[in-house]
Image: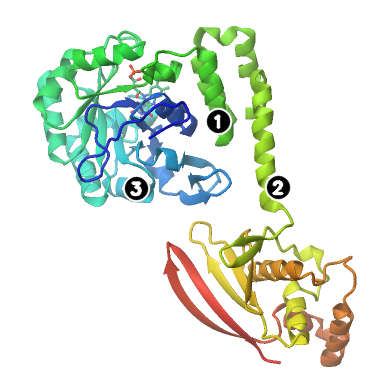
Amino acid sequence: MNDCCGLINRTLTTMSGRLSFRNITALAPMVRVGTLPMRLLALDYGADVVYCEELIDIKMVQCQRVVNELLDTVDFVAPDDRVMFRTCEREKDRVVFQMGTADPDRALTVAKLVEHDVAAIDVNMGCPKEYSTKGGMGAALLSDPDKIESILRKLVGGVNKPVTCKIRILPSLEDTISLVKRIEKTGVAAIGVHGRFKEERPRHPVHCDYIQAVAKAVSVPVIANGGSLDLVKTYADIEEFRKASGASSVMLARAAMWNPSVFSPKGLLPVETVMEEYLKYAIRYDNHAFNTKYCLCQMLRDKVETPQGKLVQAAQTNAEFRFMRGFIEEQQAKRNALQSHCLQDRPIMDGDVLTMAVKFERREYPPQITPKMFLLEWSRKEKLEQPSYETVQRTQDRAFQSTVTVAEKKYRSSLWEKSKKFAEQAAAIVCLRVLGIPEGRIGEEDSGLVCKRKREMKGINGSDEEGSKKRHLVDGQEEIKTTKTESVTNGDCHTQNSEQTKS
Ligand SMILES: Cc1cc2nc3c(=O)[nH]c(=O)nc-3n(C[C@H](O)[C@H](O)[C@H](O)COP(=O)(O)O)c2cc1C
C-alpha cells in the first residue's frame, strides 16, 4: 500500500485474509495519543499495525456508528455527541481496537459494534492505573485467569476478526508462562507482552528475559513491548529489541509518541517536521484540540518551554497552533470550499436523482403553506400525476431522507431531516427550486396559490374557530392514504410510501 510519504506498507494478511501479527512492528495502545492522526502518521512512517487508545466497554456500548461524510470517517459517537472512536478506510486493515473490559458479554457487544471497521480486537490486561483496576479491568484481570479465559473465548467465538490481548508479566516466570499458555488455548491471534511487573513504572528496565521465555513457551506470535527509552530510540533499535526479546513482533509506545518517524527505515525525522505532518492529520480529521495539544507537547518533550512550545501550550483550538498558520489556513480554505460545495444552490446528479443541500425551515413559510402543497398544486395545474414520496430512515441517528418523483424525474435533498414530514418538504423544495417554481416562502414573489388557498379554506371551514382543523388539513396534505412497505438494505430501514390524496 502506498502512503503519502511514498513508503510502502507490507501486505500483512494470513491465508484466511486476516491481519497477521507475525513479524510486525506496531504502534502500541496509548490513551490520548493513539487517536486517528497519530495512527495514520505511524502507518505513513512504516508501522505495520496501529492500536487505538484503550476504550472502555461501558462507554463504547452506548455509542452509535455514524458515517461522517464530510470527513470521510466512521465515527462511534456517545449519547453526549462525543466521538469516542474515529477511523477511516486508510487504516481499516491495520487498526486494532483495544478495549478495557471485565465483562465477556459487554466485550462481545462492543467487538461486534466495531468489527467491520477494524482489523482486530485487543483486550487490555496490563493497565495498572486505579481507574482501570478498580472496575476489574486492565492489570486486575491478571489475577483472575478464569475471567481472562471467558472474555477471550467469548470474543474469539463471537467475532470474525483476530482477537489479541496485552498483558504485563507476573511476579514469577512460571506463573507468567502458565498464564500465556492458558491464553493461547483460547484461540487468540497474538499476545502482547509488556515486560514489566504490575508495580513497575516506565523508568524501570524492561525484563527481556521474561518476554524471551514466554515467546519460547507458546507458538502464537508474541509482541514484545516495553523497550522505549532504554532500548529503542531509532529504527535500527527495533530489530535489536526484537532479537533481545526473542519475540516475533515489537510494539512501541513512548518512542513512537515522542517521534513516530521511529518506524521509518529512512531514519528519524526532525520533530518539527513530524509535528507538522501530525497537525495536517489533526486538522484534516477534526481531532479534538486538547488531544492535538497533548500529542504535540509529547513530541516537543524538553522543548515544551521554548517559544514554539509555549505557543502550542497556549492553543485552545486546532487553528491556534499558529506556528503552522499558513498550512492551517490552506486546510481551512479547502474545508470551507468543500462545505460550500455541499451546500451550494446548484443541483447535483446523484445517480438518477437531482439533489441539492436543502433544509425545510418551518418559520420560512406562512402557517398554512408548505412546499409540498405548492408542488401538488403545480402538478395538478400541469395535469401531471401527483408527486410521490419515498422515504428512508437511517439506523444510526434515525434521520429521514425523502425522494419525490414528479413527471418521472426524481428530486431529493442531500441533507437528512429529523422527521419524515420535514424530509418530504425538503424533497419538495428541491423539486420546486430545480423547476423554478415558487415554493411559498415568506417574501417570495406571490404565485397566487397562497391567496387561492386562503380563499378555499374559508369556503371549507367557514369560521376562524376551525383554524386548527384547517391547519391540520393543509399541513397534512389533506387526507392522506398511505400504503407502507418496509425493507432493510445495508442496515438502513427503507420506508416506501405511496401517497394518494383524496380530493
Ligand atoms: C501516554 C501513554 C498511554 C498509554 N495508554 C495505554 C493504553 O491505552 N492501553 C495499554 O494497553 N497500554 C497503554 N500504555 C502503555 C503502553 O502501551 C506500553 O505498554 C508502555 O508504555 C511500555 O512501552 P514503551 O516502553 O514502548 O513505552 C500507555 C503508555 C503511555 C506512555
Name the image quarter holding the N terminus.
top left
Helix, strand or loop under label 2:
helix
Q: Secondary structure at mark 1?
A: helix
Q: Of callouts 2 and 3, which one flags the residue occurring earlier in the amino acid sequence?
A: 3
Q: Which residue is mark 2?
A: 340
* Ligand 1 sits in quadrant: top left
In the rendered view, would you say 384 is above or below 25? below
User: Looking at the image, is 349 positioned above or below residue 260?
Assistant: below
Q: Residue at x 50, y 14 (%)?
A: 271
Q: Nearer the viewer, residue 239 or 81?
A: 239
Label 3 residue SS: helix
- Find out whether the residues at labels 2 and 1 contact each other: C-beta distance under 8 Å: no
Label 1 is placed on what type of residue? Ala
Q: Residues within 10 Å of mark 1 (few under 14, many from 20)?
A: many
Residue 172, image quadrant: top left
Tell me if residue 172 can be seen.
no
Instruction: Measuring from the top left, give residue 255's x and y in whole percent.
Output: 39, 16
The residues tagged by marks 2 and 1 sit, at their Cα atoms, a distance apart of: 21 Å
Q: Is residue 140 above or below residue 253?
A: below
Instruction: Name the residue beneath numbered marker 3.
Output: 115
Nearer to us: label 2 or label 3: 2
Amino acid on which disc 3 is placed = Glu
The color scheme shown is rainbow
| Residue 348 occupies quadrant | bottom right
Task: Name which quarter of the figure residue 251 lies in.
Answer: top left
Disc 1: residue Cβ within 8 A of ligand 1's nearest atom = no
In front: 110, or 142?
110
Real-space Cα separation, disc 2 to disc 3, in angstroms? 34 Å
Residue under label 1: 282
Q: Residue 259, image x and y in percent?
A: 44, 16
Residue at image coords 37%, 31%: 50
